[in-house]
Image (spheres, helix red, strand yellow):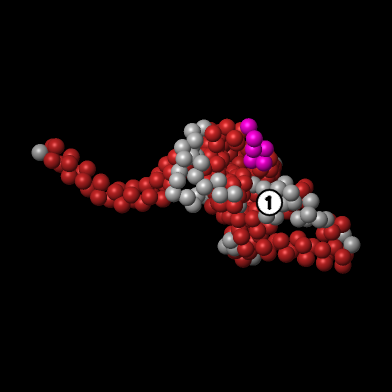
Amino acid sequence: MKAKRSLEDWLHQFTFVAPAFVFFAAVMLVPFALTFYYSFTSWNGVSNEVSWVGLANFKQIFANDSAFFDSFSFTARYTIVSVVLVNLAGFLLALLLTRPLKSRNGLRTVFFMPNVIGGLLLGFIWNFIFVRGFSAIGNATGIGFFNLPWLGDASTSFWAMVIVTVWQQAGYLMVIYIAALSNMPKDVIEAAKVDGASSLQTLWRIVVPLIMPAVTVSLFLAISWSFKVFDLNLSLTKGGPFRSTESVAMNIYNEAFQNNRFGLGTAKALIFFIVVAIITSIQVAITKKREVEA
């Protein structure tokens, strides 16, 4: 009787879980398994012939592919700067827009709006702004900042990518920080004020520790977004000038679909996945240890 009941429970659970598992396997597990397989082949992505080459792709990447590591260097620098600035901007906006301002709902919408625009379209818009808009403002005002070769120089192109990224993503993280700040227990803040804590001390020693779960999520999102950047990179700089702003995702795309070396591209993608997984796991482990409860 007990075994029959257990079997019925198992069938009930299987009935509800099976469709979701099949969907998850179709869109996640199978493509990942194929990526793992193709990384050990020399497939060009078109031919029916798939030749097994073992570790040859990985040897070629580590021994002869300096462009891949240059793109990794650019992506790492871009990720570090973007993650810091995006989170800082999102947090400061959240602090400002949790104040009793009459226009705060409208301002929240305005700052969140860039997220509605896709990265590809956003890149083309900012490409026009950097090339035509900034140039026009610079010629009219004589301010050197606007006359910089924003997309024609390696250093300024890097900062062009960062500026657009912060402009696009800060509003999204602002929403997360606003939710955390709004749900923070007010009696703890009042107790800190009664004890004579300054605004800066209250912010650093009370507010920030209490919203650490939001910091964990925001850092994770910002890191994964920055590492995976492709559409903005493609439409804003196309990886130029001279591949100085080529992200890892763009390098993998070019290898697989422009050079028709799908096996080599998937090997790079596998390395990229492992690196991002390690970094995000370390970040989550570190920030979760700092989470406290009021």
Which span of residues is magenta-colored?
A: 63-68
Residue 108: x %, y % from top left: 61, 61
| SS for dot 1 | loop
Give the labeled residue for mark 1.
239
Q: Is residue 101 above or below residue 214?
A: below
Main SS class of the magenta portion in the image: helix
Pick the residue in front: 20 or 9. Answer: 20
Taking the image as shown, residue 177 lies to the left or right of residue 26, namely right
Q: Please report the residue visible at 74 percent of the width from the left and 51 percent of the height from the top.
A: 241
Q: Is residue 276 above or below residue 159?
A: above
Quarter of the picture holding the N terminus: top left
Residue 112: x %, y % from top left: 60, 60
Taking the image as shown, residue 212 lies to the left or right of residue 85, namely left
Question: Magenta includes 65?
Answer: yes
The answer to whether residue 135 is seen in the rendering is yes
Which residue sits furthest right? 142
Q: Which amino acid type corresponds to the residue marked 1 in the rendered image?
A: Gly
